[in-house]
Structure formats: structure tokens, C-alpha cells
Image (tube, rainbow, N blue to C red):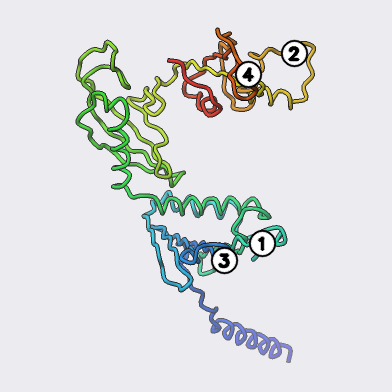
Amino acid sequence: MRISKWIGIAALLLIIIATAACVQAPATQGPASGNPEIHYKLYGGFVRPEYSVQELVVVQDRATFTISGVDGNITQRFEKALTREQFNAIVTVFSANNFSSYGDRYEEGQTHISDVGFADISFTADNRTKTVTTYNVNRYMPDGLIRIREKLQETIAFTKMPDEKELRVLAENWIRDAPTYKYDGQDLLFVRFASADSDLTRHVLTYNFTGSHAGYGNRSGMMTAQVITPHTIQITIMDSTVESAIIDGKWDESGQFLIGSDAALSYQPMMCEKTKWQSWEDSSGRVYIRMPTNEEIITHYYSSVYGVNVTWVKTVPLNGMACEACNVCLETYHVALTVNASEMQPLLDEGWTRVP
């Protein structure tokens, strides 16, 4: 009896197992295992009717971005091929920020956000899809989702960028109008086009050309050796803008300086108006036994705020009279300093000028 009882139980278990094996899992659309697919859909909010829905689709070899109107018709479409490294970088940001752990919706702060619209982020792999809906802004969103959104926005920018042919036209026009080539350049020859794997929107184009004189930049009025000089220039373009242009690895064509050299800068304040460094010092709350000089404040300001090491800071009196009209007349002095030319941009942005 006992043996037949156990045989019966075993037979029942086998029937249950066989029955379960015949039940198929519900079909889910998505790529095969190992081929993730990403959808990033933007909709709602205050946008023009022809921009009603915007969607990025990323698969293994390409990224496609479409813009549709309220009627559902696609008004614009962009597509770019992706390298394996570019695709892996996009997929990695999802795993690195544990996308599967997030909730389905993030709508916190709805009483504080105007109608900015929504974003659906979907990741499909192994026949399973995870979708997270958020506001189309980064506020009230986990840091990991912000990083994912930033990577997707970067991918949209890359997808909308001009193709290699258009970028070459942009780069070549820029080179021909730049001082070095415009002065004596000739025989511009394309060498190489490369995309940065870590930054989809940055491209580097390399060219060769020759000059008929030694040196760089506009050498009008200068004594230069008349000799055929070969050059190589690397143009870095980001968001359809020339970000940098380096000739022979040592001359910055956009900034017009030898890399590693010092640049002399000058600044003349306005009367009765505090400079950036004076306002910064006043708000610091520091107490001194001896009040620092203007030169010391300038040095400390650029070191602390921008990490820039300025040297030879000097206040130079100017000859002449000034009126008493505040914020209209220039001061009767200017400040001079030197800085590594590669680091001078923050100062130029604040009103400093280069001294020839």
C-alpha cells in the first residue's frame, strides 16, 4: 500500500510538470537576447504642433530620431550609424545606473512644474521591456535616471548632427578663412575623419597643407623665411561648431598662440564698479590681519574659481584725467598679468584683453 501510494504521488507530479511545460509565456515584442533596443519618447508640453512627438530608437548598429506632428505624420527624420563602441556606451549607462530598479513613473513635484511634457524611457533585452515615465526635466528625478537621460539627449544631438561630408565642408571652410592658411596656405588635403567613442557629438578631422613661409598666423609685416613648409591641422568639431584647431601639435589656430606659451592680458575697470574678484572677496567672509592687495586677490580668485595660475600681476597707473560719472568712465589704472595661453579663456570671458 505504501509503495503504491508513493508511485501515485510521483505520477501526479510528472503530470503537473508536463502540463506546466506546455504553457507558453506570453509573447513580448523586442530584440533577441543580447541585442538590446532602446526607445526614448518625448511628448506633451508646450511645443509647436509639428513637434508633438519626438522619439529616439537605438539598436545595435544605428540610432534613429523622428519628429512627428499632432496628426502622427513624421515631419523630420535623422539617422546615424553607430559603432560597436558607441552602442555599448549607450547600453552601459543603463546597466551602470541600475535602470531595472526604478519605478514605473516619476511625477513628484507636479504642483511645481509647468506643462513641460513627459518622457518615456524603454529598455528591451532578453524579450523583456522596462519602461519608466518621467517629466521631461531633470528635477525630482533620481541621479541615475538623470545620467541616462543625459546620455540619450547626447545621442539625439549626435543623430541630428551633419554627416561626414557636411562636417568636412564646415572644417575646410574654417581652415581656409583662418589666419595661417589665409596668409600663405595651399594644397589642402583631407587625411582622416574620426568620432570620439566616449562623446558622440565630437569629431576630429585631420588635414595636411603647405605654407610658403615659416611660422603661423597672419605674418604680414613680419620678417619670415620664404620656404615651403608642410603642416598638419586637426580640427575638432562639436555641435557643428569648431571647438579647437591645432596645427603641427603646437599652434592653437583658433586662439592664435603657441601651446605652452604665456599670454599677456590687461584689464581696465570701470569707476565706482566692483570687479568680479572684488565682489568675490567681499562675499568670502574672510578676516585678515593684513588686508590683501588687489594683486593678491586677483591671484587667489582665478586660482580658486577657475584653477588658473596667473603670474606677474601688476596694477599700472595711466596718465590722464577721469570724470566723476560712476559706471561710465574707466579707472585711471589698468591691471596687467600673464597666464598660460591655453588657460586664458576664463579671463577673456570676464573682459580681459590680450596685449600684443
Going from N to C along the chain, the mark reached first, 2 or 3, is 3
Q: Residue 98: where, in percent of width, then height?
A: 61, 55
Q: Residue 64: where, in percent of width, then height?
A: 41, 60
> Closer to the observer: label 1 or label 3?
3
Category of crowding for the residue at label 3, using alpha-carbon neighbours closer than 10 angstroms: few (below 14), some (14–19), many (at least 20): some
Amino acid, disc 1: Tyr
Give the labeled residue for mark 2.
291
Secondary structure of residue under mark 4:
helix
Q: CA distance from mark 2 to mark 3?
A: 56 Å
Vertical placement of residue 131 versus 178, above or below: below
Going from N to C along the chain, the mark reached first, 4 or 3, is 3
Give the labeled residue for mark 1.
106
Question: Left or right: where does residue 105 sit relative to residue 176?
Answer: right
Q: CA distance from mark 4 to mark 3?
A: 48 Å
Q: CA distance from mark 4 to mark 2?
A: 13 Å
Secondary structure of residue under mark 3:
loop
Going from N to C along the chain, the mark reached first, 4 or 2, is 2
Which quarter shows the C terminus? top left
Give the labeled residue for mark 4.
298
Amino acid, disc 3: Gly
Q: Residue 96: where, in percent of width, then height?
A: 58, 51
For the residue pair 231 and 216, the one nearer the viewer reads as 216
Secondary structure of residue under mark 2:
loop
Amino acid, disc 2: Met
Amino acid, disc 4: Ile
